[in-house]
Image (cartoon, rainbow, N blue to C red):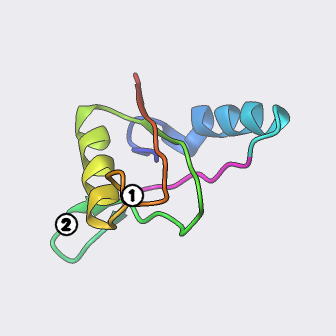
Amino acid sequence: AVNSSKDPNLAFSLQLADYMERNGMQTSILEATKDSYGNYHFYFPPDNDAIVLVLGGDGTMLQCANDLNLEGRSGSSHRWRKMMRFLP
C-alpha cells in the first residue's frame, strides 16, 4: 500500500516489488483511491493470505489499517493473517 506522494513514480515501490518477486513472492502495488469526499482509501484484492507493507507516513499506515478493518480482515476470526510494517 503506497502513498504516491511519498514515492513519486513508484520508484522505490517497484524496486521493492522486484526484489520480493526475485525471491519467490507475488506482489501487488496498491495506491490509495480518492472517494467522493476527497478522502483516500485502500481497496485490497480478495486473496487468501497477505503481508501488507505500507510505504508512507503515519497517516498512510493508519488509513491502511482502518481500511483493512472495514473490510473485515482484522481479528482472529478472519482467515487472513496480516503483518503491517511502516517503512519511512
Query: Circle 1: is it few (<14), some (14-19), or many (20+) Cα within 10 Å?
Result: some
Left or right side of 36 for 71 = right
As displayed, is residue 48 above or below residue 88? below
The quadrant of the rendering that contains the C terminus is: top left
Look at label 2 and name its amino acid.
Gly
At horizontal 48% and vertical 36% (from top left) the residue drawn is: 7
Q: Which residue lies furthest to the front in this view?
A: 77
Residue 53 position in % (x across, y down): 49, 38
Look at label 1 and name its amino acid.
Ala
Q: Give the residue pinned by disc 2.
A: 38
At horizontal 75% and vertical 42% (from top left) the residue drawn is: 25
Residue 32 position in % (x across, y down): 39, 57
- What is the quadrant of residue 37 in the picture? bottom left
In the image, which disc is placed on residue 48? none
Range of residues picked out in magenta: 26-32
Q: Are the residues flagged by discs 2 and 1 in contact, CB closer than 8 Å?
A: no
Q: Does the magenta stretch include residue 48?
A: no
| Secondary structure at numbered mark 1 | loop
Please identify, in this view, whether the residue under mark 2 or under mark 1 is nearer the observer.
Answer: 1
At horizontal 46% and vertical 37% (from top left) the residue drawn is: 83
- Nearest to N terminus: mark 2 or mark 1: 1
At horizontal 57% and vertical 42% (from top left) the residue drawn is: 10
Residue 79 position in % (x across, y down): 49, 59
As displayed, is residue 85 above or below residue 28? above
Residue 9 position in % (x across, y down): 56, 44
Q: Give the residue pinned by disc 1.
A: 32
What is the spatial separation of the Cα atoms under label 2 and label 1, in whole angstroms? 11 Å
